[in-house]
Image: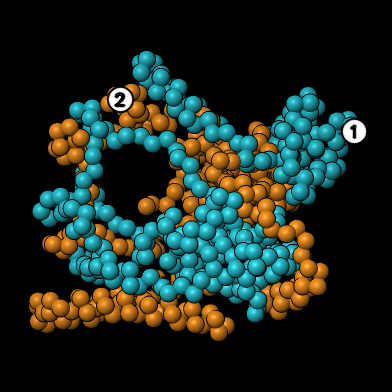
Amino acid sequence: MIRFESERITLFGLESQLGDSEFGVMAGGQRAQWKGFLKFGEVSCGAALYTAASTSDRISFNMINKASGNKVNRIYVDSETEDPVPREDQVKGFEIDNGQYLQIDPEEIAATIPESNKTLSVEAFIPCDEIDDVYFDKPYYLTPDKMGGDAFVALRDAMRKSKVAAVARAVLFRRMRTVLIRPHGKGLIATTLNYDYEVRSSAKAFEEMPKLKIEGEMLDLAKHIISTKKGEFDPATFNDRYETALAELVKAKIEGKALPKPKKVEVSKPNDLLAALRESAGLLASGANGKSKATRTAANANQGSSGKAARGTASKAAPSSRSTSHRKAS
Amino acid sequence: MAPYRWKGYLKLSLVTCPVSMTSATSESEKVRFHTLNKSTGNRVVSQYVDSVTGKPVKDENEAKGYARGENDYVILTDDDLDRVTLDTVKTIDIEKFVPAESIEWVYLEKPNYLMPDDPVGNEAFAVIRDAMKSDGVVGVSKLVMGRRERAVILEPRGEGIVLWSLRFGDEVRPEEKYFDDIEDESDPDLVPLVQKLIKQQTSHWSPDMVSDPIQESLLKLIEEKKKALRPKKSAKGKTSEASPKSNVVNIMDALKKSVAEELKSRKAG
């Protein structure tokens, strides 16, 4: 099969590990992705960015030629002549009209890498509750250098007290990027934001949906169900079961067993919705008492002491402060 | 890359409704670059060839192989893969609810928009959404996405629900390594001053804050270029060989200029 290789604009090279890391700055044995200055008002302090999250591998399959059972290799060929094109002859271009392309030499691309002023300058502060998180791209830990500590911690604590995040811009990883900076523990996290044209707004995505507002018994029942399922969640403790499940599937296939049919899912009919909610609420009320020993959530612990906790009170008693929620005993 | 699209079910206890989901982010608006063969000017395309015979592989013979041993693969079809015995392939069963602010942002991986896929589920969907909204909680569940089972959170927003996939524990680097040397205490005289500055510079969130000056000028220039090329071509046929080269240079100059201007205007503002 022939595939057209089209590279989305990574105009200035990939946002790679190489980014601006020629600084070779280390903190706690880690390499900084970027080093420069954090500037707010007339204050500027030395600062560095470190990758906060990496992507771990998912299961990858090999591409196989079914006819021969051999692995396949990917080669790059000229679309007209079908001759292989050596790496050094592959250049970037963009399509200006159907079938018409402009070539760009790597040197020219290198020449356009914006001159970075090495400054992450804060342009505005925005109230935390106004942040549209669907723009979030990648998080980086932002830390001060030895001289910049005072200004850094003052900014951190002032932002925390004022309940704001900072919007800053910088030439980062060879693009003009916007980052959102907010306090996190003793430091700051700078999250790169996706560009406006990369994000569909939720308002637009949901605009066709019917406007329904649920009130009365249905809402009360659903809230009651929620109250019995309230707890804490630490994403760090989550386990991916996919690999195990896939290994079982492969085993079944090798042994020639029939693969399990996907279970049919029964959808609640509008007429039965209220009944389903009532039944769920009933089931959960009796189930919660039996389960309270196993699930050690604070909400259930409270229920235990007050017997059959009235709905609502149990949920209000559940701790909602951030500090408790991620210091989970396990 | 086509935007992520998924159809399945949303479930709370005994209430189940059909839903569909699309990713909130998309690369379709980005300016595309292609790979060209320098010596012919033609597009470069990729082709699969048999690793032993070297011959091109037909579309219908391309298959996914799970490595059982060296050079020994079990072929899996997409249909097979759908049969993985995890309910989380097709159903988002909300197991737990947590306070909306309790999930650290650093765990948020990718946002998706979840909505009813059939009018039959409109009301059930709205019940789940509105109950979360009125309680200030988000739902916690899991879902198979891209050959991994991921923890996800469901957050009511407007008429719909935003579903975030969460990063795995081993994907988030421990902050202690980076933040250990930072002071706990700040200067009590400095903080009020910074808060004053914050007050002066507080503004409202706007998508203008995430514009991309480089892409904007690229689009403009490509547009100009198309206009400039068309009449020439029709009037004189093959005109100048040199023109693309000079246009390329112009684009690069303009890009550089736009970035410089952007930096300047940001500084000034």
Image quarter (top left, top right, bottom left or bottom right) of the C terminus of chain B: bottom right
Viewer can see residue A221: no
Q: What is the quadrant of residue A98 in the picture?
A: bottom left
Q: Which residue is mark 2?
A: B70
Residue lying at 41% horizontally and 18% vertically, measured from the top left: A252
Q: Between residues A274 and A184, which one lies in front from this camera angle?
A: A184
Q: Colour of chain B?
A: orange
Is A14 above or below relative to A220? below
Name the subunit of mark 2.
B
Q: Position of residue A103 (x, y in %)?
A: 22, 68
Toward which corner of the image does residue A232 lie, by quadrant?
A: top right
The image quadrant that residue B67 belongs to is top left
| Residue drawn 23% across the image and 39% down it | A73
Asked if B165 appears above or below A135 in the picture, the reply is above
**Which three-letter amino acid code belongs to the residue tagged 2?**
Glu
Image-based side of A38 in relation to A278, left or right:
left
Task: Name the foreground residue: A147 vs B227.
Answer: A147
Question: Nearer the observer, disc 1 or disc 2?
Answer: 2
As drawn, the chain in cyan is A
User: What is the tally of numbered marks visible in this picture?
Assistant: 2
Q: How is the image coloured?
A: by chain
- The CA distance from mark 1 to mark 2 is 61 Å
Seen at 48% across and 50% down, the residue is: B22
Amino acid residing under circle 1 = Ser
Chain identity of mark 1: A
Q: Which residue is mark 1?
A: A306
Nearer-the-camera pick, B51 or B237: B51
